[in-house]
C-alpha cells in the first residue's frame, strides 16, 4: 500500500492532468450526461476556489508566525512581479493588437503576477534552501496578487456590462478572501482554537492532494478552452511558449537576485515556482479563457526545471 501511495504521489502531476482531460471529454461526448452539465459547471465554479482556499489554510496552519521575517531580496522579487505585470498590462491596454495575439500577452501577465506555490517550500528544502524565507515570500506574494489582480484585470479585459469600479469590487471580493483569509483564519485558530489548529496541522499532507484535485479540474477547463477556441494552432503554441519564457526568466532572475543575498535556491523557487492552479483559475475566470493555456503549460515547464534541479543535486551528492 505504501509503495502504491508513493508511486501516486510521485506521478500526481501527470495523473491529475490526464484525469482532468479525460473527464472533460467524457462529459462532452457522453450524451446522456447533457442534463447534468449545468450542475457540474456550477459545482466546478464553486469547488475550484474552495480547494485553493483549503490548500492555503492547511499550508498557513503549518507556519510559525515568528519565523516570518521579510528580507531584502523579498522586496526585489515583489518589485519584479509588480512592474513586469504592469508593463504587460500597459501593452494590452494602450497598444492595439489583434484579439488572437492578446491572449499570448494575457497568458504571460498571469504567469508573472501569480503568487508562489505553497509546495515551493518543500522543493526548496530538498534543494538545500531556506524553507522559512520561501514561506514568508509565499505569503507576501499572495498579498501582492490580491491587490494587483483586481486593479489590473478589469482594465485588460473590460466587461461591457460592468464599470471598472464594479468589476474591481467583484474580483476583489473573490480574490482577496481566497488568498488572504486563509492566513488570518490560521492565525485566529492558532490563538483562539488551538485544538482545531492542531487537528488541521495533522492533515497538512492533505494540501498536496487537494492541489491534485484542483489541478485535475482546471486541466479540464483548459482543455475545454482549447477545444472550443477558434484561434489558430500556432497561437496556442505561442501561448504555451509564453509560459516557457516567463518560467525561465523568473527562475533565472530569482536565482540571480537571491544569490546576491546568499539565498540563490530560495530566490529561484520563490519567483519561479507558481501556484499554477490559481493562475489557471484566474485566467479562465477573469481573462480570455484561452490564456489559461499559458499557466497550464507553466505547470509542465516548472516541473521540468525542478526535476532537473533535484536530479543535479542527487548527482552531486553521489560524487
Image: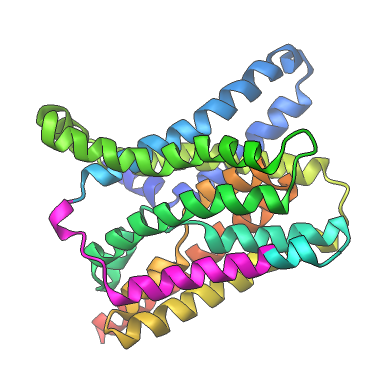
Task: State yes or no: residue 71 in magenta.
Answer: yes
Q: Which residue is pictured at 59% across the width and 65% down the height?
A: 85
Residue 142 is situated, as x and y percent measured from the top left of the image, at 41, 53
Between 147 and 73, the one nearer to me in the picture: 147
Q: Which residue is pictured at 70% across the width and 52% down the height?
A: 155
Q: Is residue 246 above or below residue 226?
A: below
Q: Which residue is pictured at 40% across the width and 37% down the height?
A: 53
Q: Is residue 5 above or below residue 316?
A: above
Which span of residues is magenta-colored? 64-89
317 vs 93, left or right, is left
Task: State yes or no: residue 111 in magenta.
Answer: no
Between 155 and 187, the one nearer to me in the picture: 155
Q: Quadrant of the N terminus?
A: top left
Q: Is residue 184 above or below residue 79?
A: above
Quadrant of the image occupied by residue 286: top right
Answer whether residue 169 is visible to the viewer in this image: yes
Quadrant of the image occupied by residue 235: bottom right
Residue 123 is situated, as x and y percent measured from the top left of the image, at 33, 63
Q: Is residue 89 above or below residue 157?
A: below
Between 129 and 46, the one nearer to me in the picture: 46
Residue 134 is situated, as x and y percent measured from the top left of the image, at 30, 64
Answer whether residue 1 is visible to the viewer in this image: no
How was the colour assigned to the protein in this rendering? rainbow
Q: Which residue is pictured at 47% across the width and 36% down the height?
A: 213
Residue 144 is situated, as x and y percent measured from the top left of the image, at 44, 57
Between 221 and 12, the one nearer to me in the picture: 221
- Report the number of discs: 0
Type of secondary structure dominating the magenta stretch: helix
Q: Quadrant of the C terminus?
A: bottom left
Amino acid at each position: 500500500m505504501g509503495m502504491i501511495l508513493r508511486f501516486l504521489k510521485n506521478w500526481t502531476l501527470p495523473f491529475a492532468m490526464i484525469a482532468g482531460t479525460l473527464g472533460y471529454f467524457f462529459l462532452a461526448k457522453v450524451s446522456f450526461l447533457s442534463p447534468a452539465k449545468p450542475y457540474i459547471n456550477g459545482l466546478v465554479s464553486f469547488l475550484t476556489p474552495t480547494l485553493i482556499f483549503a490548500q492555503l489554510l492547511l499550508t498557513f496552519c503549518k507556519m510559525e508566525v515568528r519565523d516570518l521575517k521579510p528580507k531584502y531580496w523579498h522586496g526585489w522579487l515583489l518589485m519584479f512581479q509588480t512592474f513586469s505585470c504592469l508593463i504587460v498590462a500597459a501593452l494590452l491596454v494602450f497598444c492595439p493588437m489583434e484579439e488572437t495575439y492578446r491572449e499570448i500577452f494575457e497568458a504571460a501577465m498571469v504567469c508573472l503576477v501569480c503568487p508562489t506555490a505553497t509546495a515551493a517550500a518543500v522543493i526548496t528544502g530538498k534543494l538545500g534552501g531556506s524553507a522559512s524565507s520561501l514561506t514568508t515570500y509565499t505569503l507576501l506574494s499572495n498579498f501582492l496578487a490580491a491587490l494587483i489582480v483586481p486593479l489590473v484585470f478589469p482594465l485588460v479585459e473590460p466587461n461591457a456590462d460592468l464599470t471598472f469600479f464594479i468589476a474591481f469590487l467583484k474580483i476583489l471580493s473573490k480574490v482577496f478572501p481566497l488568498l488572504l483569509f486563509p492566513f488570518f483564519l490560521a492565525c485566529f485558530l492558532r490563538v483562539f482554537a488551538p485544538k482545531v489548529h492542531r487537528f488541521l496541522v495533522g492533515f497538512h499532507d492533505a494540501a498536496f492532494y487537494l492541489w491534485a484535485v484542483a489541478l485535475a479540474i482546471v486541466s479540464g477547463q483548459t482543455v475545454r478552452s482549447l477545444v472550443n477556441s477558434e484561434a489558430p494552432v500556432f497561437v496556442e503554441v505561442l501561448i504555451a511558449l509564453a509560459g516557457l519564457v516567463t518560467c525561465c526568466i523568473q527562475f533565472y532572475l530569482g536565482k540571480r537576485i537571491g544569490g546576491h543575498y546568499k539565498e540563490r535556491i530560495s530566490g529561484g523557487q520563490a519567483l519561479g515556482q507558481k501556484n499554477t492552479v490559481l493562475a489557471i483559475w484566474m485566467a479562465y475566470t477573469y481573462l480570455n479563457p484561452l490564456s489559461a493555456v499559458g499557466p497550464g503549460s507553466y505547470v509542465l515547464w516548472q516541473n521540468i526545471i525542478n526535476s532537473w534541479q533535484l536530479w543535479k543535486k542527487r548527482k552531486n551528492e553521489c560524487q
